[in-house]
Image (cartoon, rainbow, N blue to C red):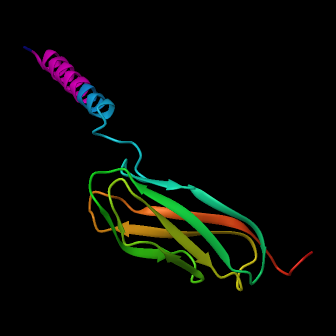
Amino acid sequence: MNYYSFEIKRYALCMTSSRNFLRIALSLFFAGLISTDTASGDQLSISPEIANFGTVAKGDPIEVRFVLKNHGESSLTVQFMEFSDPGLLARISPVINPGHAVEAVVYWKTAKLSGNVTGSVILSFAEDAHPQVNLSLEGFILDTYQE
């Protein structure tokens, strides 16, 4: 066997292995064992995905509500929250039990904001298998009150 025939056989073996890997990956995907939804896993749904609070006057507080539902078989525990702006605050139950929904209320102080704004609260969970979740809100802050 010369060098070229060895390379062709090695290439054919690699292609067969790649096809087998792809076949296994597709089988797992369709069986639901591999998910492409990395934002929420398949365990947690968030509504709305992005909350648009519309137009408010500078200094008016904003209150936005999100519903988080645990579709999994185990509880999720909120470990900590990160805020994109110092004027953001959030209130949420620390544990989301399986099959239950909780409401997350996000407050935003607008005294130092103006124009188009976006903000987010990132929830991190104690469970390693669950990724972070982003609660996003957007809208417009008027510089002065207009009737």
Q: How many marks?
A: 0
Q: Looking at the image, which is closer to me, 35 or 91?
A: 91
Q: Residue at x 27, y 51 (%)?
A: 73
Give the x, y percent position of residue 121. Answer: 51, 70
Give the quadrant of residue 130. Answer: bottom left
Q: Residue furthest right?
A: 147
Give the x, y percent position of residue 17. Answer: 19, 26
Q: Looking at the image, which is closer to me, 21 or 3?
A: 21
In this view, 65 is above or below 87: above
In this view, 111 is above or below 39: below
Residue range highlighted in magenta: 2-21
Give the quadrant of residue 12. Answer: top left
- 5 with respect to 93 (left or right): left
Give the x, y percent position of residue 72. Answer: 32, 51
Give the quadrant of residue 20. Answer: top left
Q: Residue at x 56, y 55 (%)?
A: 49
- 120 with respect to 63 (left or right): left
- Does residue 100 belong to the magenta stretch? no
- Does residue 9 belong to the magenta stretch? yes
Q: Residue at x 25, y 23 (%)?
A: 19
Q: Residue at x 63, y 61 (%)?
A: 51
Quadrant placement of the C terminus? bottom right
Q: Looking at the image, which is closer to me, 13 or 86?
A: 86
Quadrant placement of the N terminus? top left
Per the picture, the main secondary structure of the magenta-coloured stretch is: helix
